[in-house]
Amino acid sequence: MSVTLTKNYGDLTLLFVSDIHGMWTELETKVNTTGLDSTDVASGWATWAMVTLEKDTDYTMGLTSSGIVRFYSTDNTFVFAHDTNAKITYFKINGTEVAQVDTSANFKVKKDVFFYNRSTVYGLSYLIGYEKPVLVYLTSTTIQVEQNTNTAHRTLIVFPSGPIAVTEDISATHKFRKLVTSATANGYSTSHTGAADSGMKSGVTLTANTWYFVYAVIVRGGDDVGNNYIMVADSVNPTPGNWSTLDTSYGSGGWVYLGMFRYGHGGAQTTTMVPFIQDHQGWLTFTGRAASGNFFGIRVASTTISSTSYTTLETFTAANSGDAAPANVSIIKGTIRPVGDGDSDFHGAIRITDGSDVTLWELPSFGSNLSDNEAHGWEFKLPNVGLKLKGRRGVNASEDWDVTAYISAVLDEWV
């Protein structure tokens, strides 16, 4: 059997999608009605040294998934055929196979996958085990980001737009991996000029007893624009409702939240960064205390109990400042310390409730009849749900008593 096509195409003829569609329709009309088989059409009916399809145009080869176009390298021919057997698709560069899609639709690569336009030597196989680096406390005014690679002074961060690694010896400089709170961050805006620098976001100043949130931000302006990032301390927390604000400040896909620090212990020492250790699970544990504090952490309540009925002493609201934990904190860990305010016996009870006054933690009774210096600390660990600290004096106690509460650690769910 043979067929004659209406049109003939010579070597180096530019073909458009309409030509392919028309040729295919004509073939199916002139050949059998059950499918286009290689036995019905000579294998060399359509031979070109080069075929160019119209750019950026969708086209269909055949009407079913079994209609295929196959290239035979033995005689440089393209053949339209009808084949129901799945074939392997190979991807080659300069004759070397780099990937394939096998007959079970598995995508297999023989080379590691790297990200376009990112100056990183870390491929996809390395990034599978990637852990976002944590913040490291250095001094009361300085933090750094953890080194998380085998290369000295190098930290890798995977941004939504791809991974970036920066190398900086923070013992000599502070530009990318080290943040000093006295500096103003530069380079995070497309309007910035000059050298990049980590620091406080422009317009954000340190305020007593306030939480600040640290972001790794791709450098978008100035001398170091490109595959570099800096650390920026901001007053905007990383909860989803603030993502659009952060996108406006740092560019969509151009920022990653690293963690937070607290400026001020509460009580007497309110204007110094609280020392901390941050882990990869999101816990921020405080390792220092105010000069007048009895326990590590942040002092959030200190008051006298005189009523024999439960009285609310403190409410731990979700806020970025004051005696509170921000909205990105899911669990609060702390210590409560009661102590007498005189020389005779004192006793009472303490409880912590949620915002609806449901009791979550309770010390039903405690006391001492020795002196106001004898007291103990009791630890609690509770969800950050508008907690209320309540206390009462014992009915038969001879004196009032004081209570002090501390936050010793918080679980940051966005780390």
Image: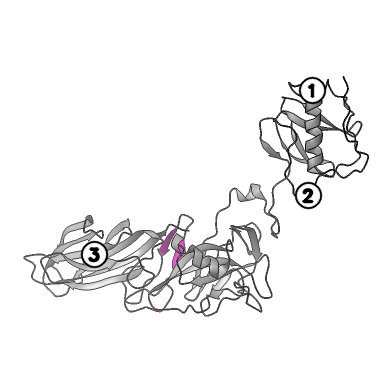
Residue type at mark 2? Lys
Q: Residue at x 77, y 32 (%)?
A: 25
Along the line of sight, which residue is nearer the eye, 168 or 72? 72
Give SS at disc 2: loop
Label 3 SS: strand
Q: Is residue 268 above or below residue 75?
A: below
Q: What residue does disc 2 label?
A: 55
Horizontal and vertical percent position of residue 142: 51, 74
| Mark 3 nearby-residue class (10 Å; few <14, some 14–19, many ≥20) | many
Mark 1, residue position: 37
Q: Amino acid at mark 1?
A: Asp
Distance between the alpha carbons at the discs numbered 3 and 2: 69 Å
Q: Nearer the viewer, mark 3 or mark 1?
A: 1
3 left or right, relative to 142: right
Q: Name the spot of residue 400 as percent of width and height, x first.
A: 13, 72
Residue 391, image quadrant: bottom left
User: Pointer 3 and pointer 2: residues touching (CB < 8 Å)?
Assistant: no
Q: Quadrant of residue 250?
A: bottom right
User: Residue at image x 66%, y 30%?
Assistant: 104
Residue at (14, 75) in percent of width and height? 342
Q: What residue would you read off at disc 3?
A: 389
Segment tinted magenta in the rendering: 271-285
Depth order, front residue of 190/210 = 190
Apparent side of residue 263 relative to residue 94 in the rendered image (left or right)? left
Residue that protrudes farthest toward the front in the picture: 6
